[in-house]
Image: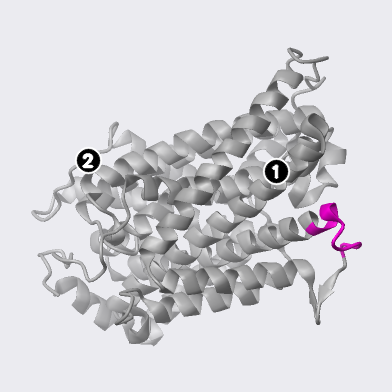
Amino acid sequence: MATDEAGVATESDLERTVGFVGALTIGVGTMIGAGIFVFPGLAAGRAGPAASVSFAIGAVIALLVALPTAELATAMPKSGGGYYFVSRSMGALAGAIVGIGLCFGLLFASAFYLVGLGEYALTTLLEAGVVETERATVGPFPLAVFAGGAAGLLLTAVSISGTEHTESIQNAVVGVLLAILAVLLSVSALDVVGIRGDPSLPAAFAPRGFGPVLTTAALVFTSYLGFAQIATVAEDVVEPDRTLPRSMVGSVLLVGILYVVTILIAASTFDPGTIAGMGETAIVEVARAYLGSIGVLGILVGGLLATLSSANASILGASRVIYALSSDALAPPAGARLSRKYGTPHFALSFVGGVAVLLVGSGRTEILAEVASFLHLVMYGLICVSLLVLRRSDPDWYDPSFESPGSPLVPALGAVASFGLTAFMQPLSQLLGAVVVAGAAVWYYVHGAETSLKGALES
């Protein structure tokens, strides 16, 4: 494949099939899955209605990163997203840390979404009376674990059969999902403010103080990983110069508003102690309170669709990171091989899907989410630094069609906010994230990747 002076490929091996709607739904579909259908109980249980501020903080940080990312993506519209940007601007070691960290982060996120999907599948069967206990099993596996694992395998098979199939799934799923949410949020908001009945506004906005707001923001930041998913599939995107900036910024703004409204309604419906005990499916009880059994059915369908779309986009994104790593000799060559029949990186997809399914059995939902957030925040910080480096060095090959406004202030704030938010995570999440980062550096040196990646960058 021909490359330019920066080692940026001048033509793509992957077929560009993802349009603006597809790119937007990759971002929106990934984010809505966690932020609305998994996190309300966990977040409102920690911080009460003030958890809405946590989501707002996450949206601001995401925008501070999305703008620099959009600029870099239009200059380097290649698979791998943050890995590609950092390796081409800050060198081989930083690129290796980001690439391997991003791969693990997406794997953890995929498993997290599949766990949520399994919980929604189980809740649906319980509501329908098909099963009678939450401890229902399929052979040796709990039903929720079996459902999440089976969905992971199915999504992997669909992705292997063609990216256009993945896009079709995302478009249909997100369309139905937004319609369901529009009904639920409209009806419940009218009740909360007292237009339909007695108002149920909370007596205290921050019943546990504002201390938990930042720690909750660190937890729920996984909800904003979707815009970065768009960058990882940039090589599949039609007209990347226009599509990438619009879809990245648009997806953050849309879901940020939805998150804040959803959390305010959920926290106005139940007190923190009650909603915390509802776990990952708390939004189901919110729907029951305002719309009865019809609302429960709608939100269960929505939860299944949302977690499905999040897992779908994360598996696709992780496979494209492996594709980029393998192309630069940072991962085994099989990861860069494309299926002769479908034109997709089938080995990379199979690896991602298989590992994600194995992780589903861990059951540590919050830890999986926070480790994914930690690794993405490290990448986001380095992406912002990359933009500052490229703006300063101004290489001949760097010619983005979109320029991030407010530079250098916006990328500088994005870097500080991204790195700073990791300090508010649980110690175990920080430790596991640091282990992945250190392991990536060790892999880079021990396996001779230093020479091979530098060669790829200089070719």
The residue depicted at 69 percent of the width and 23 percent of the height is 189
Sequence-first tag of 2 and 1: 1
Element at badge 2?
loop
Task: Report the span colored magenta.
Answer: 125-134
- Image quadrant in which you'd find residue 317: bottom left
Q: Nearer the viewer, residue 54 or 106?
A: 106
Verify whether residue 2 appears in magenta.
no
Could you say where residue 73 lies in the image, as x and y percent from the top left? 27, 51
| Residue sitting at the far top | 195
Q: Is residue 259 above or below residue 103?
A: above
Residue 299 marker: 1
Q: Is residue 457 left or right of residue 261?
A: left
Q: Spatial distance from mark 2 to mark 1, Cα to Cα?
A: 38 Å
Choose between 340 and 112: the one closer to the eye. Answer: 340
Of residues 206 and 163, which is closer to you in this image?
163
Which quarter of the figure is the C terminus placed in? bottom left
Looking at the picture, how far across and down is residue 108, in whole percent?
Answer: 58, 65
